[in-house]
Amino acid sequence: YLWTNNHVVQDATFIRYQLCDQSGFEYQVPMSDFWRDSNRDFASLTLPDNLSGLPTFEAADLSRLREGQDIYLIGSPLGFKCSVSKGVLSYNGRHLPRGELSSVYGDFQTDAALNPGNSGGIALVMQDGELKAIGMNTFIISPTRSNIGLGFIQPLDMLQTSHNYKRDHGGRTFVSSIDATFADLSFPYWQRIAAFDLRAADFIADGNRGAGIRTLKSDGVGVLAGLQVGDIVIGVNGL
């Protein structure tokens, strides 16, 4: 599959894509071949059989990411194809609006150079002695529309969830929400919560697993159901 951002392809009638290995091959596909999800700014294309053997990066363990570690971004900023920029993970888990779906880990914020043309490119970190994928370069916040060191990466777990909807439901999207954002219990934010929340501290110390509620929409169904920030979800419908 080829993954990119929906905003990269949304106004196109066809897409032309080219490999970075100087092979010179160029492929053109109609937009009807793309599955697009505007809510999550995600688009997916099934690659032709003759491209099935392309090299890939392994997925990184997102729970091991820490602020300050190096990040490498690949893209084509301002048309300069196959460029690599380097920065650090500025914030691990910046929860920003993302349609109806939020990543467990939140968006990854970086100061690595992101400019128009970087969208849809891959973001990598070094783990276990090799570069591994953490997500997709998606957008910047800037008053000038150019890089000022506030770039954001969609996490791989959220991209995989969007892709699975396409695979399992034929392109139809089904989303339920309790109007909350979550943090994995290994996430540094939750460790800080545990420092003053004895319920969370005891739960984590006992080696239990769950998803901690980090924020709740004030008029959302989660609040109406009695959920509170700091609660730990350990199952849904018995699972």
Image: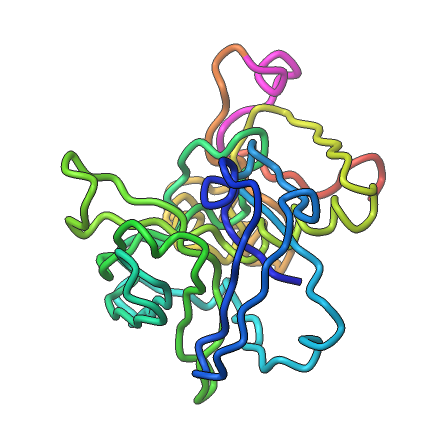
Check the image and report above or below for 103 versus 231: below
Relative placement, left or right, of 206 versus 71 is right
Relative placement, left or right, of 95 versus 220 is left
User: Which residue is nearer to you in this view: 57 or 189?
Assistant: 57
User: Which residue is nearer to you in this view: 178 or 16?
Assistant: 16
Coordinates of residue 167 in the picture (x, y in percent) = 79, 51
Residue at image coords 56%, 32%: 39
Coordinates of residue 3 in the picture (x, y in percent) = 58, 57
User: Which residue is nearer to you in this view: 200 or 102?
Assistant: 102
The single residue placed furthest to the bottom in the displayed view is 129
Quick one: quadrant of the C terminus?
top right
Based on the picture, tell me whether residue 228 belongs to the magenta stretch. Answer: yes
- Magenta stretch, main secondary structure class: loop
Quick one: quadrant of the N terminus?
bottom right
Based on the picture, tell me whether residue 192 belongs to the magenta stretch. Answer: no
| Residues rendered magenta in the picture | 220-230
